[in-house]
Structures are given as structure tokens and as C-alpha cells.
Image: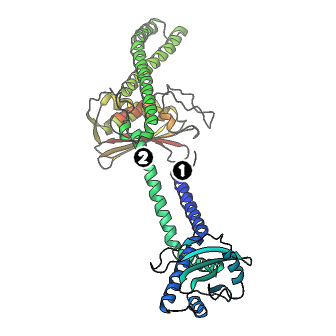
Amino acid sequence: MRKSFRLHVFLAVVLCVVAFSGASRLLVTNSAVEPLQGHFSEILARHTARELRATPGPVHTGQLKINLEKSLDDIRPGEMLVWTDQEGPPAGAAPALARALATGRIVWTLVQGQHPGQAFEMADLKANAQDWRVLRTPHLQGQVYVALQKTVLAKAANSILQTRDGILRNLLPMLIAFIVLVTFLLTRSALKPVLMLQKAFASVDVKSQTEHILPERHYREFAGFISYFNALLDRLRASYAQAARFSSDAAHELRTPLTIIRGYLHRLVNETPDGSHAQIQLSLVAEEVERLISISNKLLVLSQADAGRMSLEKQPIKFNDLVGEMVDDLKSAHTYLRFSVDLAPGISFAGDPELIQQLMINLFGNAVKYNHPAGQVNVKAATLQHKLVFSISNTTQLSRTGLDDRVFERFYRHRVAENREVSRATGSGLGLSLCREIISAHSGTIRLSFPQDGWVSFECTLPA
């Protein structure tokens, strides 16, 4: 059997959630730098506008540069330049920037979020093998330029991302718990329709000829599967009904000729000389005919159970008297066996006398038939919580291999013995199947157990 489907879905959802979290983090890390640089550029433009408004008149680029550098962390000399059209660019990389600006091929974009009276534009340039971001704004002395290396903006953006990573590390236990919770809820939500369909399958009564699973009660994705199941159920019911009808018809048709044959055989046995070879042969044939009649009767009862037509004529049954009579008969017929009876006093219940008699005959018959010389048969019974619980246990030389729930199947017979001296008693393979149907018709249960090595027990529970 393959692994749990629920576990498979749970692990798949966990993997998807973790993969989505990792992919989103990687995507944010790779795509957030440029927006953050744009945000810092807007902050720098607003700071520059405040400085220009605070000092009316000519622009002192040196003082403006000092004031702007205060708004940035870990800025090194030469990473920021400030100049105007009248003063010209200072030494360093500014001349290269000025030449790049003079080409006129620079694409300027408007900086968002600025004061209406102080518009800023920005552009990205490359000078002296360095990337720069240049801001410009009109003033009394012409254009005022503020150039900043993009590495400064990148460091500021990375510091924010590192802060974010630190917060995530602190929240990691909560994130793991959240992922597990979300995965559990998603798995439960995904499997709920499947579990509902499973319950619908389990609740269908195979013996009912009209009960089906209604597709409108489930999601339309399951419609094809439900239709296939209903069609399979109809075919199964048709085959089931045909087999039950065949068993019933065959049992009915066989009973009459077998009864006639039995009558003729008994007459021939009585007419032949006692102890003669012919009488012995006729007696053996008569025994086989009796066996066929027993099989026919069992098949008839089983076919009635299959069709749900097993009628019960319940009457009060004194369980102690029934067991006592059967044990006395078995003791006289099987003197080599030891019988032990442990019954609570006054046990009685309501049941069909004929069917209960057949039940006890089958169980005791197996206990004797598959026993061994000097074996034992133990019978225990008691009432517990308004239920009759009784067991018939016996020693056996049958191997444990093959002794399982298959013994309740029709025509299943255990043939493996650990000891070659085990009796060659054979049966029809219908006795225990009939026992299960009789117990089920009385709303009870029967199960096979092994109380100890070399023992087998059938435990039955009936409403008391």
C-alpha cells in the first residue's frame, strides 16, 4: 500500500508554501533595490529643496553639500558632489559628469512627491567607471546639481533589507507555526470533499436496489467518478442478485429429488441383508445424499440472507438448557474428548430457535470435527451490558496459517495441518458462513480468536 494521501498532500502544500516564501523573498531582494534607490532619491530631493528655501539668495554649494551629507550614513569623501551652472563643477569626477551632461543625450525624469514650487529631475550617468545619480532643480543661479554615487543608495537599500531579514529571523518560530497552520487548513480544505465522497461510498447499501450516490451533492469534478461508481454498483447488484437467485433456485430444485433419493436409499438399506456389502455401500451413498441435502438447506438460508429475506420467528430461548443438551449428546458420542462448561446461571434471550439451533450445531460440530484425540472443548457464556457473550474454544492441530477471517467465506476450507494425524474430516465450507449470517440477522457479531497456542475460539455476541 502506498503512503498516506493526506500526508502526501500535507507535504506538497508545505513544500509549495516554503517554495513560495523563498521565491518571494528572493524576488523582493532582487527587485526592491531600484524602488528603494528611487525612494532615497526623493528624500534627497526634498532635503535639497528645504535647504534651498531656508537660504534665500545665492547658493553656497559647499554648505549645501555638508548639510545634505548629514542625511546619509557612512558617506565617504567624493561620493557626493554639488555645483551650479555659474560655479561649474568642482574637482574630481564632476568634470566628467559635466561633460556627460553637456552631450544633451541624457534622459531626465521628474522626481515624484516634491514641493509644487521646487521641481526636481533625475538621471543616471556613468563617469570615471562609476555610476551616478544626478538631481537638478532650477534656482537663481541657474540649475543646481546634486550628484550621488549609486553605491551609497545601494548601501542604504541593503541596510533596510538587512533590517527586514533581522525581523524575519526574530519571527521565524511564528512564521513556521503560521506555515504549519496554513498548510493544515489548506490540506483539510482540499481533502474535505474527498472525505465526504468516501463517507458516501461507505454508507451505500449494496443490497439496496435503488440507493446510489447523488452527483449533485458533490463537486462537479467528481461527477465522472461518481457515475462510474454508480454503474459499477448496478452491475455488482445485478451479479449479486443473479448469484443469490441461482443459489436459491438450485437449492429449491435439488431438495425435492434429493429427498426422493434419500427415501429410496433408506428403503433399499432396510431391504438388504444386515451387514452385507450392498447395505454398507448403500449406507455410504445415503450419507452423501444427506450431506447434499444439508448443503442445499444451507444454500437456501444463505440466499435468503443475501436477499434480505431471512425471517426470524423470535422466541425466548434458555441458553443454558440448549448448551447442556448439546454437550450431553456430544459427550456420549465423543468419549475421547473432554468438555468444560462455564455458564452464568439463568441466561436467556430472544431468537429464532431453529436458526440458533443450527448455529450451535455448526460451532460445536467444528469444535469436534477439527479436534484431535484427547482434545478439549470449552464453553463459556455470560451476560454483559444487556448482551450475551459466549465462546466455544477447542484444541486443534490445524495450522495457524490460513486460519483468519476467510473461514467465514463460503466454500473456504482450511486444509493445512501441523500434525499428519489430524482427522480427515471435511465439510462443505458453508457452516461458518451460515453462522455469521445467523448472528448478523440477530444483530450480533462473531469473531475468530486464538486464546493460546494450539487453541482456536469463536466468540459470539448477541443481544440478551
Which residue reaches farthest right? Answer: 128
Q: Is residue 459 above or below residue 424?
A: below
Query: The disc labelled 2 sits on which kind of residue?
Result: Pro
Helix, strand or loop at disc 1? loop
For marks 1 and 2, the one nearer the N-term is 1
Q: Residue under circle 1? A: 4
Q: Residue under circle 2? A: 193
Decide which of 183, 317 is in the foreground and name it: 183
Query: The disc labelled 1 sits on which kind of residue?
Result: Ser
Instruction: Give the residue drawn at x 43%, y 7%.
Output: 264
From the image, which quarter does the N terminus lie in? top right
User: Can residue 340 be seen in this snapshot?
Assistant: no
Q: Is residue 179 above or below residue 218?
A: below
Which quarter of the picture shows residue 309?
top left
User: Can residue 368 be seen in this snapshot?
Assistant: yes
Instruction: Give the residue drawn at x 34%, y 33%.
Output: 441
Structural crowding at the residue carrying mark 1, measured as other residues with C-alpha within 10 Å and reported as few (<14), some (14–19) or many (≥20): few
Structural crowding at the residue carrying mark 2, measured as other residues with C-alpha within 10 Å and reported as few (<14), some (14–19) or many (≥20): some
- Residue 338 point in image, percent of width and height: 47, 39
Q: CA distance from mark 1 to mark 2?
A: 17 Å
Instruction: Give the residue drawn at x 47%, y 35%.
Output: 367
Q: Is residue 9 above or below residue 268?
A: below
- Residue 189 point in image, percent of width and height: 43, 53
The colour scheme used here is rainbow
